[in-house]
Amino acid sequence: MKLAVLTAYLESLAPLVYQEDYDNSGLIVGNPDQEVSQALLSLDCTEAIVDEAIATGCQVIISHHPIVFKGLKRFNSKTYVERVVEKAIRNHIAIYAIHTNLDNIMGGVNQRICDTLGLKNCRILSPKHNLLKKLVTFVPQSHANEVRDALFAAGAGNIGNYSEASFNIDGVGTFKGSDATNPYVGEPGKRHEESEVRMETIYPANLESKILMALILAHPYEEVAYDLFNLTNQYQQVGSGMIGELEIPQNEESFLFQLKDKMRTHVIRHTALTGKPVKKVAVCGGAGGFLLKHAIAAGADVFVTADYKYHEFFDAEGKIVIADIGHFESEQFTAQLLYEIIRKKFPIFAVRLTEVNTNPVKYFI
Ligand SMILES: [Zn+2]
């Protein structure tokens, strides 16, 4: 299939607008029109990964971490970043990154950590704002159901675990078409009154063009009246970190023991144990220190994340146990997650999990 078909699907689940400002998710190297028959999945995109793609006949590498974060000015093989890009281009291998946009969705990187730890009732720890909008439109009674259905099918009306949410109120619309019109009801040049429904529904801003297209196609009028509003509401489905609960509370030692086992980590760096049972657990794959306040406010007993610095450990202040399990370890199941996502949609497309361990951190035990 065309590479664009694959990336469009990934971006329908993890839209690029959900990535953080510093990130560079998306197609980094390659032509969206190129044909691909096999993808290599990895956490990082290193030279060894490009070599593996060449050796195994993969035309695209899909990695969690983007190989390029900042602008590159020269390509003279000086750094591993330049060498990866040069080698990929020379060998017609595309590089695609699905990073913080995959972290920030339900069903993404953090959900996979929650599932691995057996957490229930999981939700986003720090939901994002300014991603939702509201549509208000005015529809003749005769077409209210049809328009509502079309809006829902295009992705409007979802709030938490509820779908098809809208508010509807009956009223009277007026309009007068010029001689150039061919109104659905009424006559040109005469004011017409029509029983209409004022229909309101919510939608993620990134779906706006799709939703407006659905509205215009389903609405019978030549000119469709609608208002769009920016909402400052939190979007509960998108944001950083997750929090969930253990089915049965555990003491801290046994929780850490299981954490070490399930996340296949050599060592856990953690703050002083509090002596309280562990019930609520916050997680953030990779560097999650910025979420500590959210984890404490949400009542988490333990915060599982990575990349903690010495001084940052003091911030636990006996309120929570910070458990740093290592960056690679926290995200090691991400390639498997991508494998399942792609396999489910494209069952006959070949996807290959890397056999290279890209963790640059070694443990001398
Ligand atoms: Zn990471």
Image (cartoon, grey):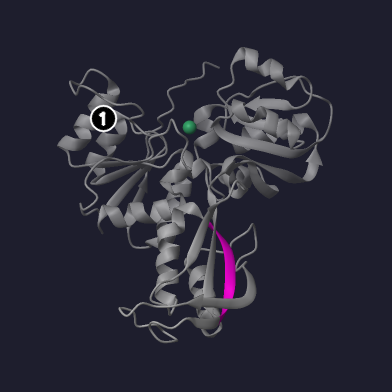
**What's drawn in magenta, residue-wise?**
195-203
The quadrant the N terminus occupies is bottom left
Q: Residues within 10 Å of mark 1 (few under 14, many from 20)?
A: many
The quadrant the C terminus occupies is top right
How many numbered marks have been drawn onto this rendered protein structure? Answer: 1
Q: Is residue 95 left or right of residue 309?
A: left
Q: Is residue 132 left or right of residue 29?
A: right
Q: Is residue 229 above or below residue 272?
A: below
Which residue occupies 46% across, 46% down? Answer: 336
Residue 165 is drawn in which quadrant?
bottom right
Which residue occupies 56% across, 45% down? Answer: 112
Between 84 and 10, the one nearer to me in the picture? 10
Q: Is residue 348 above or below residue 275?
A: below
Going by the numbered disc 1, the residue's amino acid type is: Val
Q: Residue 351 in magenta? A: no
Dominant SS in magenta: strand
Q: Residue 266: image x %, image y %?
A: 57, 26
Q: Is residue 318 left or right of residue 331?
A: right
Which residue occupies 23% across, 40% down? Answer: 55
Report the residue that reaches farthest toward the right.
276
Q: Residue 198 in magenta? A: yes
Between 261 and 77, the one nearer to me in the picture? 77
Residue 188 is drawn in which quadrant?
bottom left
Q: Is residue 11 left or right of residue 105?
A: left
Report the residue that reaches farthest toward the left.
90
Residue to which mark 1 is pinned: 84
Q: Is residue 220 above or below residue 66?
A: below
Q: Residue 326: image x %, image y %?
A: 55, 26
Residue 179 visible, this angle: yes
